[in-house]
Image: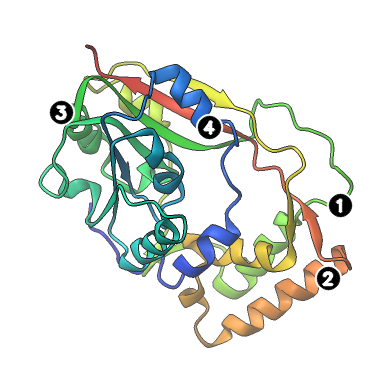
Amino acid sequence: MSYDPTIYQGAAAYYRRGRPGYSPQLEAVLTEELGLNGTGRLLDGGCGPGVLTVRLAHLFEQAVGLDPDAAMLDEGRRLAERRGITNIRWVHARAEDLPAAAPGPYRMVTFGQSFHWTDEARVAEVVYDLLEPGGALALVGHTVQGRPVPPSPGPPPIPHTEIEALVEKYLGPTRRAGGGMASVRTHRFEDVLVSSRFGAPRSIFAPGTPGLLRDSESVLAGCFSMSFSAPHLFGRRVEDFAAEVRELLASRSPEGVFWDWPGDTEVVLARKPG
């Protein structure tokens, strides 16, 4: 598939503030499941601003963050520098450029809410070859469906439906993605992996944060961090859109505080024998 470099144009600066974090227990769950001990190498594909790369780097001798968006990589570098993390190499490339862009072997390859942007079947087979024997492919994301929803700690939930209506008001009823329209997904990651050399994967869960609170600017940043509502899509009306979102949020929470429940962190895990 061809890559559109405008998919996340202008979104990098909003990503970390606008996206809810993965489970605080993610590192512990992966360590227990895979026996991680500070050795081996990590490849984080479609790493964006290094959300997973920076969190997991200390579990390996070396980490590689790979992404086709240079602005995202710049954000990742800055975050790693601020935290004094020195074992990450940042690679400007697509997953389809593997293995040449970042040769293996790797103990673990992760994709944090990014595998769907790739040629999934092809990339799965490439990753299989990149992994050392016993290595794992981990597709990390948030899952609400089928997971218990905790009670609100008090503040109102983010009015996602109304925000989506504002996006539609400005951009139309069909979801955008870069210079085109977003494709409709009709399959699961499991459907792709079961047909690969990995075979059937399994899902493990790390509990989410039930009391996650976000302010209004974080909620707005979340809008601008999405491919279907990235800042460039609004053109000259971007400030008008932002003003309407802020007005909506103020009407729902004068204090500007919202409860967010992105769900538990799901890891679709596929292992290479060995």
**Disc 4/disc 2 C-alpha distance (Å):** 33 Å
Q: Nearer the viewer, mark 4 or mark 2?
A: 4
Distance between mark 1 and mark 2 Cα atoms:
13 Å
- SS at circle 4: helix
Q: Which residue is mark 3?
A: 129
For image coordinates 50% across by 62% down, the residue present is 228
Q: Is residue 175 left or right of residue 74?
A: right
- Amino acid type of disc 4? Leu
Q: Which residue is mark 4?
A: 26
N-term mark: 3 or 2? 3
Q: Residues within 10 Å of mark 2 (few under 14, many from 20)?
A: some
Residue linked to disc 2: 250
Spot occupied by residue 230 in the image (x, y as percentages of width and height): 49, 68
Residue at (81%, 60%) from the top-left corner? 257
Looking at the image, the residue that sits furthest to the bottom is 236
Going by the numbered disc 1, the residue's amino acid type is: Pro
Residue at mark 1: 155
Dots 3 and 4: beta carbons under 8 Å? no
